[in-house]
Image (spheres, helix red, strand yellow):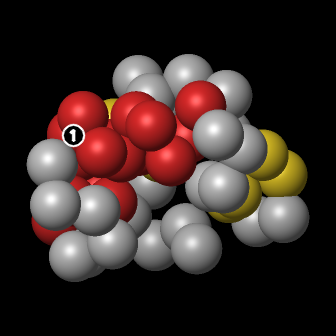
Amino acid sequence: MARRARVDVELVRRGLARSRHQAAELIEAGKVRIDGLPVVKPATAVAPARR
């Protein structure tokens, strides 16, 4: 089973943000969603297969 990772780390790993700081800014601006639901905390755990 794959480990869950912080959503800010996943955004950087997938190339959607240049840094965790930038990922946090995107999350706080309401621009990040997981399965259609907004993410409100950069430390939210997410399974790698989620979109």
Residue at 76% over, 65% down: 35
Instruction: Please tell me which residue is depicted at 30% across the width and 45% down the height of the picture.
Output: 22
Which residue appears at 59% of the width and 31% of the height? 28
What amino acid is labelled 1 in the image? Arg
| Place of residue 11 in the rendered image (x, y in percent of width and height, measured from the top left) | 33, 60
Residue of label 1? 20
Horizontal placement of 46 versus 19: left or right?
right
Q: Quadrant of residue 15?
A: bottom left
**Residue 46 seen by the camera:** yes
Q: Position of residue 46 (x, y in %)?
A: 47, 46
Quarter holding residue 30: top right
Q: Secondary structure at mark 1?
A: helix
Q: For the C terminus, which image quadrant? A: bottom right
Q: Is residue 44 above or below residue 22?
A: above
Looking at the image, residue 7 lies above or below residue 49: above
Q: Is residue 34 left or right of residue 43?
A: right
Q: Nearer the viewer, residue 35 or 4?
A: 35
> From this viewpoint, which residue is outermost toward the right?
36
**Does 11 appear above or below 29?**
below
Where is residue 13 shown, x and y percent of the image? 17, 65
